[in-house]
Image (cartoon, rainbow, N blue to C red):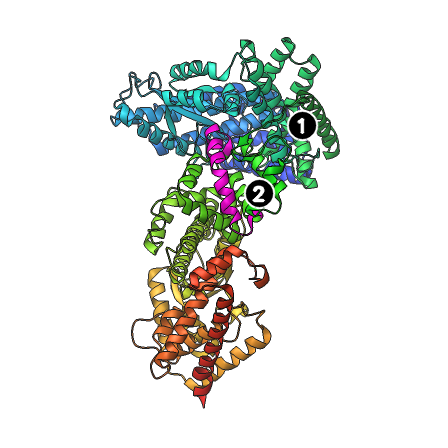
Amino acid sequence: MAVRAAGEQTNWLLKPAAKLAPLDQNRARRELSEITSAAQEDGLTRLAKFLAGKGASQEFLAAVFDLSPFLRGTVRRRPQILGALFDETVETRLASIGAAIDKAARAEGISENSLMMELRQWKAEAHILIALADLSGEAETAITVRRLSDLADACTRAAVDFLLRDAHGRGKLKLPDPEDPARRSGWILLGMGKLGAHELNFSSDIDLVVFFDPQAPAVVDPLDATELFSRLTRRLVRILQDRTEHGYVFRTDLRLRPDPGSTPLAIPVEAALRYYEARGQNWERAAMIKARPVAGDLAAGAAFLKDLQPYIWRKYMDYAAIADVHSIKRQIHAHKGHGEIAVKGHNVKLGRGGIREIEFFVQTQQLIAGGRFPELRGRETVPMLGQLAARGWITADARDALARQYWFLRRVEHAVQMVADEQIHILPEDDEGLERIARMLGFADAAVFAEAFRAALHQVERHYAALFETAPELSAGIGNLVFTGDVDDPDTLQTLQRLGFQRASDICRVIRGWHFGRYRVTQSAEARERLTELTPALLQSFGQTRRADEALMRFDEFLAGLPAGIQLFSLLQSNPALLKLLATIMGAAPRLAAIITRRPHVFDGLLDPALLTELPDRAYLSGRLAAFLEGDRDYEDVLDRLRIFASEQKFLIGVRLLAGSIDPARAGRAFSDLADLTIEAALQAVIAEFALRHGRIAGGTVALLGMGKLGSRELTAGSDVDLILLYDHDTDAEESDGDKPLAPSHYYSRMTQRLISAVSAPTAEGVLYELDLRLRPSGNKGPVATHVDAFKKYQRKDAWTWEHMALSRARAIGGDQTLCTEAEAEVAAVLALPRDSAKVMAEASEMRTMIEKEKPPRDLWDIKLIPGGLIDLEFIAQVAVITGKVEAGGRITGTAEVLSRLAPDFAEVQVRQELCDAYALYLALTQMTRLCITGVFERDDVPPGLSDLLLAVTDLPDFGVLEAHLKETSQKVRKDFDLLLRAKRS
C-alpha cells in the first residue's frame, strides 16, 4: 500500500521547487486535513489520499494554506482545482481554461448571468493555479504576470464577444460574422498599464480605454453608436467586476480615457485622435506606450494605435515636454510622500525605490528617445531595459540591477496580494504579517527578507536619482498673479496678503502644485488653463470668507481627490453664486468640507441644475437609494454603499440648507427620512445575512421604533440615532431553523447586536449612524431586543414617567409592516392612558432640575441645556402629549407640531406662539451649527462665514443682536416652562 501511495503521489503534476515554511506547523497540518476532508466529501478519493500522504508536495500545500487565507478558502470550497493537476500540468490546465473561456460566449443558450457565473468559476481556478505555480517556483515571475494578463485578456474577450452577439441578436448591430463577432465590429478595447504590457499583478484591476468606429460595417446607426457602445461598455464592466456569490472576474477601471470627467465611456475614434493631438498630456503619452488591443475589433485597435504613433513618439522633444516629464517625477515624491526607506508599511509600488520608479525610469527614456529609435517603443519594462542598454542610454550595470530588482519587487507585490486577494501594495506593519510575506517568498524569516528588501530599494533609488540629477524647473504664469518655479514672487505675496491670506508663501506653494499637474484634476492642459483663468476669482472668494488660508487649504484637499475638473472649473467660472457657495463650505463648514474632501464625487450633485429646486422628500430619497443599491450585492458591499449614500445625501441636504432652498425644519425631516431609509435597508441586509447562518424563527418579525430626534423627525447632520427593536414570533417557536439554531430571545438579541455593528461599526466608508438603544425597556439593564408583549407589559406596568415622555416621540421607522402598525397602536394607547397631571408635571420639573445640576450648560450657545433651552421646550411638549393637553387630530411626534397644537386650557395663544417661535430659532441655530462644525460651538472661535450663515438663517443683522435675541428667548421659555409645568401643580 505504501508503495502504491507513493506512486500515486508522484502523479500530481506540480512539483514544488521552493520550500516554504508555515507560520504554525500544527495549524498548517489541521488546515490541510480540512481540505482533505473537503476532497473526500466531494468524492475526490484520489486527491484525498494524496493530501493525506507525506512528502514535499503536501508540506508545500500545508504551508501555502497556512500563509494565505484566500488560497486556503478557495481550495476548501473547490478542492477539485487541485485534483485537475493529476491529469494536466499547470500550463496545460491553464490552456484548457483559456479555451473554455473562449468558447463560453458562443455556447448555446448562454445568458449574461450564466456567462458571469462561468467566467468567475474559470477565473477562480486559474487564479489559484497561477498562485500555486508562482509560490512553488514552477513559474518565474515573468511567466506569472504573462499568465495573469492572458487570463484577463480571455475573460474580457469572452464578455465582449457575448455582448456583441447579444447586440446583433437584438438588431442593434449587424455583425459581418456572428461566429467571429469582434471582427469588423468597430468596438475597440485597449488594455492599458500592466494589462497592456502583459505585466498584470495577482489582484490587479484592469485598465481599459474604449473607442469605437461609427463607420464600421457592424454599426447600424452611426448617430446612435456613442450611446450603444457606452451601454455595452457599462454592461462589460458589470460582467467583469460585479461581485456575486461566485466572486468577481476583474475590477475594471475606465478612467484612463480622454478627460474621463466629461466624456462617455466609449469615445468615437476621430474624437479621440483629435483630443490626443490637441489636448493630450505627457502622462497620457506615457500611458499610451503600454496600450494594446485586448478585445473587440483587434484590427481597428491596431489601426488606431498606428494613427496615434506621431502623438506618442515625437521626433523632437521640446523643453516644455521634458519639463512636464520631470514634474511627474516630482509629483511621485512630493505628493505621495514616501521619503523614507523602510520595510514595515512600505509601499512596494509607489514608495522610494519601488516598482513605479523602475517603470518611470524606463518610460521617461522611451518618451525622450522613442521617436527616433523605434526599438525603444516596446510595452514591457524589462525588455526595454535591455534595449536602452543596447543603445547606450543606460549602463549594463543599471540594466541588470533594475531588471533583477523589478522582478524581486513584483514577487513581493504578488505575495502581499495573495494573502487575501486584495489590491494592495503595502507591506504589513505588524511582525506576524511581515513574517508571513517573508515565508511566502521563501526567506528563512522576516529579518533576512527585510535586509534583501531594503537593499533592493536602495539599489533602485540610486539608479533612479541619477536619472534626474539635472531635472529642469517648471514655470507657468497666471495673469496678474505669478507662480513660477520654486521661488515666491514678492508682488504675488503682497497681492495674497491684500486679499486676506496670512500665510501667503504657503498659498503660493499650493497653487504651484495645481499648475504643475500634481493632481488628476489638473493633468489635462485644458483643465489647467481653466483653473488658471479661475484662480483670481477663487482667491478673491476665499479671501472674503475671512478665514482665507483655511478655506483655500480645504479646497486644495478637495482638488486632490477629484477625478477631473474641466466641467467644474468652467461651471465655477460662469456661476459666481456656486463659487461663493463653495467658498462658504470651505470657509464656514468644516464638516461639509470634510465630506467632499473624502468623497469629491459628492460635489457632482451640485452640478445638477435641479438641486436647489428639487425637495429632498422621502420619495426622492427612496428612489435614489433604490437605484444606488440596485443589483445583487454582498452584505459588506451593501453596508458600504449605505454609508456612501448617507454621506452624500447629508451633504446635499446640507448644501440646500446653506443655500436657503430649504428651511431648517425641512432639513430635519430630510435628515430623518434619510436615516429611516438607510437604517431600514441595513436591517433588511442584517436579517438576510443572519438567516444564512442561523435560519429564521417561525412567524418571526421585527419592528424598529425611532426615538428621540429621529422619532420626532428633527435630526441634524450630526445627530445620533435612538432606537428600540421589537420582535414577535409564533408562540410555539422554540428555536431558529438554521445550521446554528438559536432560541428566540437569543436570536433577536444577537441580530440586534449585528444591526448595531452594521450601522455603527466604522468601515473604510465611515460610520452610517451612531446608535443608542438606552431608551429600551429597563435601559442598559434590559435585553437589547424586546418581545412586543414584554414591551406592552413594561410600558403599562413598570415604565417611569420620563419613559412615557420619551415614548411620545416614538415612531415606527422600519421592519415588518404589521408589527410596526401594532407597535404604533400600542404606543398611542399607552400615551392615552389616564394620568395624574400634577404628578407628571412634578416629576418632569424635578427631572429638569436634576439635569441642570448634573449637566450645567457651558454658555449661552449650549442651546440644548441652557435654562429655557431645547430641553425645556421638549419637556413641555412631551408632558402635554401624555397628559392629553394637545388639540385633537392625528398622532404627531414632532416637537414643533405639538407646541403648535397645545390645548388652549394648557397654554394661552401668546404662550403657544412664544414657544413655537423659540423652537424655530433653536432649530435654525442647531441645524446650521451641526451642519457646519463637528465639535462644540466655541463662541470666541466661530468661523466668520458661519456667523454670517447664522445671521442669514435667523434674519438678524448682527451677531451681537443674535446673542441678545437668544438670551431673551431663553428667558421667555424658562418663564413659560415655570408657568406651564411648575405653577399649574399648585
Find residue 496 and name its label.
Answer: 2
In magenta, the rendered stretch is: 522-549
Per the image, the residue denoted by label 1 is 353
Is any part of residue 261 visible from this angle? yes
Which residue is at 28% across, 23% downward? 222
Q: Which of 199 and 442 lies nearest the eye of the viewer?
A: 199
Majority secondary structure of the magenta segment? helix
Quadrant placement of the N terminus: top right
Q: Earlier in the sequence, mark 1 or mark 2?
A: 1
In x, y percent, where is residue 326? Answer: 60, 24
Q: Is residue 868 above or below residue 959?
A: below
Instruction: State yes or no: residue 528 in magenta.
Output: yes
In x, y percent, where is residue 720? Answer: 50, 61
Which residue is at 46% across, 61% downward? 951
Q: Which of 485 and 11 lies nearest the eye of the viewer?
A: 485
Q: Which of 177 and 524 lies nearest the eye of the viewer?
A: 524
* Tag 2: amino acid: Leu
Q: Which of 282 and 424 lies nearest the eye of the viewer?
A: 282
Instruction: State yes or no: residue 505 in magenta.
Output: no
Is any part of residue 718 visible from this angle? no
Quadrant placement of the C terminus: bottom left
